[in-house]
Amino acid sequence: MRSIKLEELTEEQRTLLDAAEKAMGNAYSPYSGFSVGAAILADDGHIITGSNVENASYSESLCAERSALARANAIGKRIYRSIAVIAKHRNHNTIQVSAPCGSCRQMMYEASHISGSDLEIIMSNTDKSRIIISTISELLPLAFGPEDLGADVEKYRG
Protein backbone atom coordinates (compact mmCIF):
# COMPACT_ATOMS: atom_id res chain seq x y z
CA MET A 1 0.00 0.00 0.00
CA ARG A 2 1.40 3.38 -0.94
CA SER A 3 0.36 7.00 -0.98
CA ILE A 4 0.78 8.71 -4.30
CA LYS A 5 0.18 12.19 -5.71
CA LEU A 6 -2.25 12.75 -8.55
CA GLU A 7 0.54 13.83 -10.90
CA GLU A 8 2.39 10.56 -10.22
CA LEU A 9 -0.48 8.43 -11.51
CA THR A 10 -0.05 6.94 -14.95
CA GLU A 11 -2.33 8.27 -17.66
CA GLU A 12 -4.30 5.02 -17.45
CA GLN A 13 -4.74 5.33 -13.67
CA ARG A 14 -5.77 8.99 -13.96
CA THR A 15 -8.31 8.16 -16.67
CA LEU A 16 -9.75 5.42 -14.45
CA LEU A 17 -10.01 7.74 -11.44
CA ASP A 18 -11.66 10.41 -13.60
CA ALA A 19 -14.21 7.83 -14.79
CA ALA A 20 -14.94 6.89 -11.17
CA GLU A 21 -15.40 10.57 -10.33
CA LYS A 22 -17.86 10.99 -13.21
CA ALA A 23 -19.78 7.87 -12.07
CA MET A 24 -19.97 9.35 -8.57
CA GLY A 25 -22.25 12.02 -10.05
CA ASN A 26 -24.80 9.28 -10.85
CA ALA A 27 -25.01 7.98 -7.29
CA TYR A 28 -28.45 7.60 -5.74
CA SER A 29 -27.81 8.47 -2.10
CA PRO A 30 -30.82 10.33 -0.68
CA TYR A 31 -30.39 8.87 2.83
CA SER A 32 -26.70 9.07 3.64
CA GLY A 33 -25.76 11.81 1.18
CA PHE A 34 -22.56 9.81 0.60
CA SER A 35 -21.98 9.43 -3.14
CA VAL A 36 -19.44 6.89 -4.37
CA GLY A 37 -18.15 6.19 -7.86
CA ALA A 38 -16.10 3.24 -9.01
CA ALA A 39 -14.45 2.40 -12.31
CA ILE A 40 -12.94 -0.91 -13.40
CA LEU A 41 -10.24 -1.23 -16.03
CA ALA A 42 -10.73 -4.47 -17.94
CA ASP A 43 -7.81 -6.29 -19.53
CA ASP A 44 -8.86 -5.04 -22.99
CA GLY A 45 -8.75 -1.39 -21.86
CA HIS A 46 -12.54 -1.11 -21.50
CA ILE A 47 -13.65 1.00 -18.50
CA ILE A 48 -16.81 -0.07 -16.67
CA THR A 49 -18.29 2.27 -14.07
CA GLY A 50 -20.68 1.97 -11.17
CA SER A 51 -22.17 4.18 -8.49
CA ASN A 52 -23.83 3.46 -5.18
CA VAL A 53 -27.58 2.92 -5.08
CA GLU A 54 -29.23 3.35 -1.69
CA ASN A 55 -32.55 1.97 -0.57
CA ALA A 56 -34.91 2.90 2.25
CA SER A 57 -34.24 -0.52 3.77
CA TYR A 58 -30.51 0.32 4.01
CA SER A 59 -29.27 -3.28 3.91
CA GLU A 60 -30.55 -3.57 0.34
CA SER A 61 -28.27 -0.76 -0.83
CA LEU A 62 -25.55 -1.47 -3.37
CA CYS A 63 -22.04 -0.05 -3.20
CA ALA A 64 -20.40 1.52 -6.25
CA GLU A 65 -17.69 -1.15 -6.40
CA ARG A 66 -20.18 -4.03 -6.44
CA SER A 67 -22.34 -2.10 -8.90
CA ALA A 68 -19.38 -1.80 -11.28
CA LEU A 69 -18.44 -5.47 -10.82
CA ALA A 70 -22.00 -6.61 -11.53
CA ARG A 71 -22.22 -4.36 -14.58
CA ALA A 72 -18.89 -5.64 -15.90
CA ASN A 73 -20.02 -9.22 -15.44
CA ALA A 74 -23.31 -8.50 -17.22
CA ILE A 75 -21.45 -7.32 -20.33
CA GLY A 76 -19.04 -10.25 -20.24
CA LYS A 77 -15.99 -8.47 -18.84
CA ARG A 78 -14.33 -10.53 -16.10
CA ILE A 79 -10.58 -9.92 -16.41
CA TYR A 80 -9.55 -6.71 -14.67
CA ARG A 81 -6.34 -4.81 -14.12
CA SER A 82 -7.50 -2.23 -11.59
CA ILE A 83 -10.42 -0.46 -9.95
CA ALA A 84 -10.67 3.16 -8.79
CA VAL A 85 -12.91 4.43 -5.98
CA ILE A 86 -13.80 8.01 -5.01
CA ALA A 87 -16.51 9.51 -2.80
CA LYS A 88 -18.12 12.77 -1.69
CA HIS A 89 -20.56 13.70 1.05
CA ARG A 90 -23.41 15.99 0.03
CA ASN A 91 -22.22 18.70 2.43
CA HIS A 92 -18.47 18.39 2.05
CA ASN A 93 -15.60 16.72 0.31
CA THR A 94 -14.05 13.68 1.92
CA ILE A 95 -10.71 14.33 3.60
CA GLN A 96 -9.52 10.74 3.81
CA VAL A 97 -9.51 8.28 0.93
CA SER A 98 -12.67 6.21 0.62
CA ALA A 99 -11.78 2.55 0.91
CA PRO A 100 -14.05 -0.32 -0.13
CA CYS A 101 -16.22 -1.93 2.55
CA GLY A 102 -15.80 -5.58 3.52
CA SER A 103 -18.45 -6.87 1.10
CA CYS A 104 -16.82 -5.01 -1.79
CA ARG A 105 -13.40 -6.32 -0.79
CA GLN A 106 -14.75 -9.86 -0.84
CA MET A 107 -16.19 -9.40 -4.33
CA MET A 108 -12.95 -7.82 -5.54
CA TYR A 109 -11.02 -10.75 -4.11
CA GLU A 110 -13.18 -13.14 -6.13
CA ALA A 111 -12.73 -10.97 -9.24
CA SER A 112 -9.00 -11.03 -8.65
CA HIS A 113 -9.04 -14.83 -8.73
CA ILE A 114 -10.99 -14.86 -11.98
CA SER A 115 -8.57 -12.28 -13.40
CA GLY A 116 -5.57 -14.34 -12.31
CA SER A 117 -3.83 -11.35 -10.74
CA ASP A 118 -3.71 -9.31 -7.54
CA LEU A 119 -6.18 -6.55 -8.43
CA GLU A 120 -4.89 -2.99 -8.05
CA ILE A 121 -7.17 -0.67 -6.04
CA ILE A 122 -6.86 3.11 -6.47
CA MET A 123 -8.59 4.98 -3.63
CA SER A 124 -9.00 8.75 -3.49
CA ASN A 125 -10.56 11.50 -1.46
CA THR A 126 -12.92 13.88 -3.29
CA ASP A 127 -10.41 16.50 -4.44
CA LYS A 128 -7.76 13.87 -5.29
CA SER A 129 -5.24 15.41 -2.89
CA ARG A 130 -4.90 12.04 -1.13
CA ILE A 131 -4.58 8.87 -3.16
CA ILE A 132 -3.62 5.41 -2.00
CA ILE A 133 -2.83 2.52 -4.30
CA SER A 134 -3.15 -0.95 -2.87
CA THR A 135 -3.84 -4.48 -3.96
CA ILE A 136 -6.78 -6.59 -2.93
CA SER A 137 -4.50 -8.98 -1.04
CA GLU A 138 -3.30 -6.03 1.05
CA LEU A 139 -6.86 -4.86 1.72
CA LEU A 140 -8.17 -8.34 2.50
CA PRO A 141 -5.41 -10.47 4.07
CA LEU A 142 -6.16 -14.10 4.90
CA ALA A 143 -9.20 -13.94 2.65
CA PHE A 144 -11.70 -16.73 2.16
CA GLY A 145 -12.19 -17.47 -1.50
CA PRO A 146 -12.70 -19.96 -4.32
CA GLU A 147 -9.76 -22.15 -3.35
CA ASP A 148 -11.24 -22.69 0.11
CA LEU A 149 -14.33 -24.21 -1.49
CA GLY A 150 -12.48 -26.05 -4.23
CA ALA A 151 -14.13 -23.89 -6.90
CA ASP A 152 -12.62 -23.64 -10.37
CA VAL A 153 -13.13 -20.02 -11.46
CA GLU A 154 -10.73 -20.16 -14.40
CA LYS A 155 -13.55 -21.31 -16.69
CA TYR A 156 -15.20 -17.91 -16.13
CA ARG A 157 -12.28 -16.01 -17.63
CA GLY A 158 -14.05 -16.06 -20.96
Image (cartoon, grey):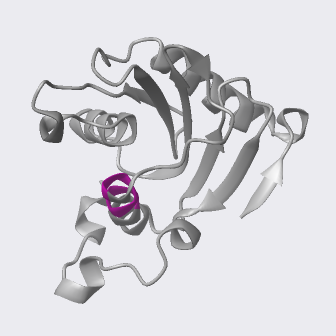
Residue at screen point 51% across, 22% down? 89
Side of 17 where 107 appears, left or right: left
Q: Which residue is farthest left?
A: 57
Side of 41 where 6 appears, left or right: right
Whether residue 58 appears in magenta in the rendering, the answer is: no
Q: Which residue is farthest front?
A: 91
Q: Is residue 47 visible?
A: no
Q: Is residue 77 above or below residue 87?
A: below
Q: Is residue 109 above or below residue 9?
A: below
What x and y, as percent, mark residue 80?
A: 48, 50
Q: Is residue 35 above or below residue 99?
A: above
Q: Quadrant of residue 75?
A: top left
Which residues lie in the magenta part?
103-108
Q: Is residue 29 visible?
A: yes
What x and y, as percent, mark residue 10?
A: 81, 39
**What is the number of callouts on the image?**
0
Q: Quadrant of the N terminus?
A: bottom right
What x and y, as percent, mark residue 84?
A: 57, 39
Q: Quadrant of residue 65?
A: top left
Side of 61 where 77 appears, left or right: right
Residue at screen point 16% across, 25% down? 55
Secondary structure mostly taken by the magenta-highlighted segment of the chain: helix
Residue at screen point 80% across, 32% down? 129
Residue at screen point 43% across, 25% down? 34
What x and y, as percent, mark residue 111?
A: 37, 58
Q: Is residue 3 above or below residue 147?
A: above
Closer-to-camera residue (10/130) = 130
